Image (tube, rainbow, N blue to C red):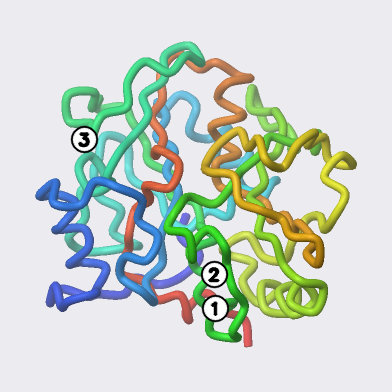
């Protein structure tokens, strides 16, 4: 269920989504994907057995902030035609996570050995898309300046249930000065397909975060005295839900290691 039309980029031009995927597929890039293929949409990944696909689709529809769905596959198909013409979901992310009964069992660089004919892939919008718009306005993003992963936290914010799927929302945090925080709200509101506006600003304890220097995922970054922690709904939420639901088998992306698509960030902006 894609929300935007297919866009092609078959040239593999330097800096393109296609070129980034080829580099990852060749195992020439193994780290976080932040900064790869500027201008191209990146996505979080959740792969589930077909028996759970309808419930997870409904979960995404009920929780569009943490789980803005931008593409799905047919059962057993490693392609996602809405997002790219040359795309192999089993090889085109730098790193994956494999789960059995809610337990993390592997973090491979490709998932060909784990592939099953009943698997359905869900690609969920990523905050990397709106980060480009923030930086274009001169807003510093500390995790990018430091070359590390954005900090992410499980919260006390409950998601809306669908079938067996339920659990806490995960948020990502960016420290911003108050004026930049106001501008960031204005900018990211234009990107509802990639998480949209912040879900919380300031006072982390109000959403169940005890210490911003101890993220559940990603890397800690400093919040300076003249800054506010600004929290956006995060596409790592399915991993938090998986830990709660404990499906018999599923695969997700490794935090920070995204799927780079052929769609442009500008296609997701509401003018």
Which of the two labelled residues, at mark 3 and mark 2, occupies the earlier sequence position? 3
Residue occupying the point 23% across, 23% down: 114
Whether the residues at callouts 1 and 2 have beta carbons within 8 Å, the answer is yes
Residue occupying the point 23% across, 39% down: 90
Name the image quarter holding residue 176.
Answer: bottom right
Q: Which residue is mark 2?
A: 131
Q: Which residue is mark 3?
A: 110
User: Which residue lies most toward the front here?
Assistant: 225
**CA separation in Å, label 1 and label 2:** 6 Å
Q: Secondary structure at mark 2?
A: helix
Quarter of the image where the C terminus is located? bottom right
* Residue 68 image position (x, y, % from top left): 58, 55
Residue occupying the point 67% across, 51% down: 233
Residue occupying the point 27% across, 63% down: 84
**CA separation in Å, label 3 and label 2:** 27 Å
Q: Can the viewer see residue 158?
A: no
Q: Which residue is mark 1?
A: 135
Mark 1 closeness class: few <14, some 14–19, many ≥20 residues within 10 Å: few
């Amino acid at each position: 269920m894609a929300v935007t039309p297919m866009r092609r980029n078959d040239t593999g031009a330097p800096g393109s989504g296609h070129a980034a995927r080829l580099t990852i597929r060749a195992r020439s890039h193994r780290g976080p994907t932040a900064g790869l293929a500027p201008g191209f949409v990146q996505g979080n990944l959740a792969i589930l057995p077909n028996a759970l696909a309808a419930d997870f689709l409904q979960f995404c529809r009920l929780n569009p902030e943490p789980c803005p769905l931008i593409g799905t596959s047919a059962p057993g198909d490693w392609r996602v035609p809405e997002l790219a013409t040359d795309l192999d979901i089993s090889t085109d992310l730098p790193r994956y996570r494999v789960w059995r009964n809610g337990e993390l069992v592997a973090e491979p660089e490709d998932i060909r050995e784990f592939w099953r004919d009943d698997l359905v892939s869900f690609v969920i919008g990523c905050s990397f898309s709106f980060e480009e718009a923030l930086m274009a306005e001169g807003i510093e993003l500390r995790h990018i300046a430091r070359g590390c992963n954005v900090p992410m936290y499980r919260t006390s914010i409950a998601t809306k249930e669908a079938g067996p799927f339920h659990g806490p929302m995960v948020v990502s945090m960016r420290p911003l000065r108050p004026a930049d925080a106001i501008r960031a709200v204005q900018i990211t509101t234009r990107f509802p397909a990639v998480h949209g506006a912040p879900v919380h600003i300031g006072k982390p304890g109000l959403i169940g975060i005890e210490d911003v220097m101890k993220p559940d995922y990603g890397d800690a970054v400093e919040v300076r005295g003249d800054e506010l922690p600004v929290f956006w709904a995060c596409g790592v939420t399915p991993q938090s839900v998986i830990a709660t639901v404990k499906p018999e088998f599923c695969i997700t992306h490794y935090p920070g290691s995204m799927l780079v698509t052929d769609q442009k960030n500008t296609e997701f902006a509401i003018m």
